[in-house]
Amino acid sequence: MHPVAYSAQYEGEGRNRLTVFFRLLVAIPWLLFASLWGIAVFFAVIVAWFALVFTGRYPQSLYDFNASFLRFINRVNGFTWLMTDEWPSFAGEEEYDYPVRVLIPGPKDEYSRAKVLFRIILFIPVYILLFVMNVILEVVGIVAWFVIVFTGSFPDGLYKPMRAAAAFSVKASAYGLLLTEDFPPFWMDEPEEAPRFESGKAVPEVMPPPAPAG
């Protein structure tokens, strides 16, 4: 089981067509903030790489900083890609009640220096799959935008591939940020991971409710 877990609450009906219509515009403040934070994270990862290569340990302050960014950008992406209509915060702490969440464990006592040293090379296949997943997100996101704007609902057939692609993306990002040594699984069904969030304040409903009989 991958150490980084992803969970999303399915919001199929009663979507806010107005905010969906202007989603890319209303998401601009969060995207700009994410860009600035991402620049700082880029340098933090470089420092963390040297620390890991020479000591085998991830400095706690750098780990918390990068993990906070990953939690934040995960919520922003969930909002931008229409998985939820709930406004994300500008914080990086765990928010158990937000519909789109990522669970990141604390740093390991010791990391493999060799895996860190060659992470750029090891990341190549992950990056290729990440590119594919981002294409899926873009294509499904565009289709979902039209469907939600015109019907006010997010079909399960569009939600599932978006959820899977988003889950891979956040785990691939965790691998790139050196937060984990585990390769992200190519495809994982979210319900398998949802129970890992039970220690929080709320466990998202990860699958749409069954259709009524008859």
Image: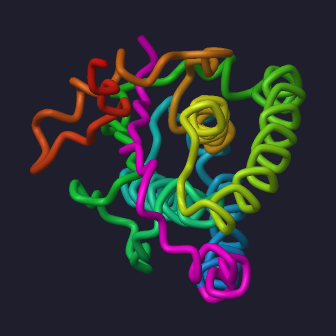
- Quadrant of the image containing the C terminus: top left
From this view, report whether residue 175 is shown above or below residue 21: above
Q: From the viewer's perspective, is 31 left or right of 106?
A: right
* Residue drawn at the location 46% of the way across and 68% of the way down: 85
Query: Do we see residue 114 in this rendering?
Result: yes
Q: Position of residue 131 (x, y in %)?
A: 87, 37
- At 71% from the left and 86% from the top, the residue drawn is 25
Q: Dividing the image into 4 quarters, which one contains the N terminus? A: top left
Q: Position of residue 135 (x, y in %)?
A: 87, 41
User: Can residue 8 be found in the magenta stretch?
Assistant: yes
Is residue 179 depicted above or below 46 in this figure?
A: above
Rendered image quadrant of residue 5: top left
Depicted 51 relative to depicted 127: above or below: below
Q: Is residue 212 magenta?
A: no
Q: In the depicted view, which residue is nearer to us: 152 or 173?
A: 152
Where residue 65 sits in the image (x, y, percent)?
Answer: 46, 62
Task: Give the residues drawn in magenta, as a range.
Answer: 1-29
Residue 181 on image: x %, y %: 56, 22
**The image quarter in which residue 118 lies:** top right
Q: Nearer the viewer, residue 90 or 133?
A: 133
User: What count of labels does the image hold?
Assistant: 0
Q: Which residue of the protein is positioned furthest toward the front in this rendering?
A: 214
- The residue that appears at 54% across and 65% down in the rendered structure is 79
| Closer to the camera in the image, 156 or 172 | 156
At horizontal 58% and vertical 30% (from top left) the residue drawn is 160
The answer to which image quadrant residue 104 occupies is top left
Near-viewer residue (144 or 80): 144
Q: Does any portion of residue 65 appear in the rendered image? A: no
**Figure colour scheme:** rainbow
